[in-house]
Amino acid sequence: MNDLSANINRNGINKNNVEIIEQYGKDIIEGLSSYRRYTAAEIQGLARGGELHAEASLIAGREINAGSTESTFVVESQDESADRQEAEIEAYARERGVWHENTWTYLNDKYGFPINSGHESYVFDNGVTVVKTSNIFQYRDLQDAFDSITLNNTEFPEAAIDVLGFGLGRDGEINIIKEQQYIEEGPRQITQQEIDEFLLSKDYEKDTELFLEGRYLNTKTGRRMNDIKPKNVILTPDGRIVPIDVIAHLNTPEFGGGRQTQNELEYNTEKNI
């Protein structure tokens, strides 16, 4: 990864390094390598997000100072890092042919008027799946948003999110286009107490620091879940509980936790890239 990142530093996102990124993403999905940012279980969640998700996660998490010397070492602010990630994902998506200047118009033309909308997403009907265009206002940056998809796919594989593309939303901000299995809702809405009990069974505890409902922390895995409320969780006709729209984070120091991350690839041959 360091050689690739140094190449991006010198030449930007181009056809050659996108081809390398594609191969890295394929290797992760096929189980030939692991991305050390995530646990083995989370690697499966990363793979469930598809090739674009794996590739974009690698770009967003790349080491900006790979190949740097003392004179060229860069110290980025959080805003600078977020802006760089967005610019590089746009360049990558254009090279991959999955960038859309207006995601709402693109999806409206393809699927018709959205069937639902909220602060983060417009939702379109695709039969057995739904397709969403979602902003990243709830996240620190794109890397955090990709973490959320990976963690959703790890914890709730029945509602796994597949990344289809990127573009600008109606507000001109970067959006991620995602597809998710349609989950049928039962005759009643789930209660917050039922959600609490469900997450307790998965080793989560309520995060009461900010006295807000729908916030949970798993200290064993270093994962944080927000906005798990009845409107974002489906109780199916056969009684299964399926969260479908969760804001998830790695509980790193940026979120007050102790989870440490290493954004490196590790091959099964023990060759580090």
Image: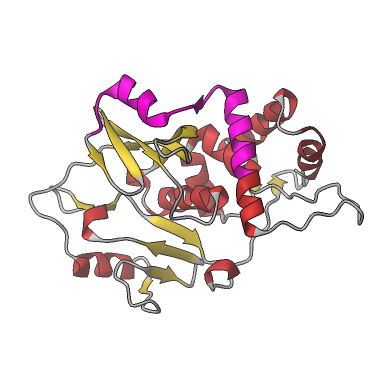
Asked if residue 35 shows in the view, the reply is yes
Residue at 22% of width from left, 35% of height from top? 115
- In the picture provided, is 88 more to the left or to the right than 232? right
Task: Please state the horizontal and vertical placement of residue 50, each as a whole percent of the image.
Answer: 49, 35
Where residue 230 sits, quadrant-wise, is bottom left
Task: Please state the horizontal and vertical placement of residue 192, each as a whole percent of the image.
Answer: 21, 67
Residue sitting at the far left: 187
Disc tally is 0
Q: Is residue 142 above or below residue 29?
A: below
Asked if residue 31 shows in the view, the reply is no
Q: Is residue 39 above or below residue 13?
A: below
- In the picture provided, is 150 more to the left or to the right than 200? right
Q: Is residue 239 above or below residue 215?
A: above
Q: Which residue is more in the foreground, 80 or 230?
A: 80
- In the picture provided, is 61 more to the left or to the right than 98? right
Residue 88 on the magenta segment: yes
Q: Which residue is more in the foreground, 254 or 2?
A: 254
Colour scheme in use:
secondary structure
Residue at 38% of width from left, 75% of height from top? 207
Q: Which residues are magenta?
A: 85-114
Where residue 132 sits, quadrant-wise, is top left
Task: Please state the horizontal and vertical placement of residue 150, each as a whole percent of the image.
Answer: 48, 49
Residue at 17% of width from left, 64% of height from top? 191
Residue sitting at the far front: 171
The quadrant in which the N terminus is found is: top right
Residue at 25% of width from left, 69% of height from top? 197
Q: Main secondary structure of the magenta part?
A: helix
Residue 165 on the magenta segment: no
Task: Please state the horizontal and vertical placement of residue 100, each as a whole percent of the image.
Answer: 48, 26
The quadrant in which the C terminus is found is: top right
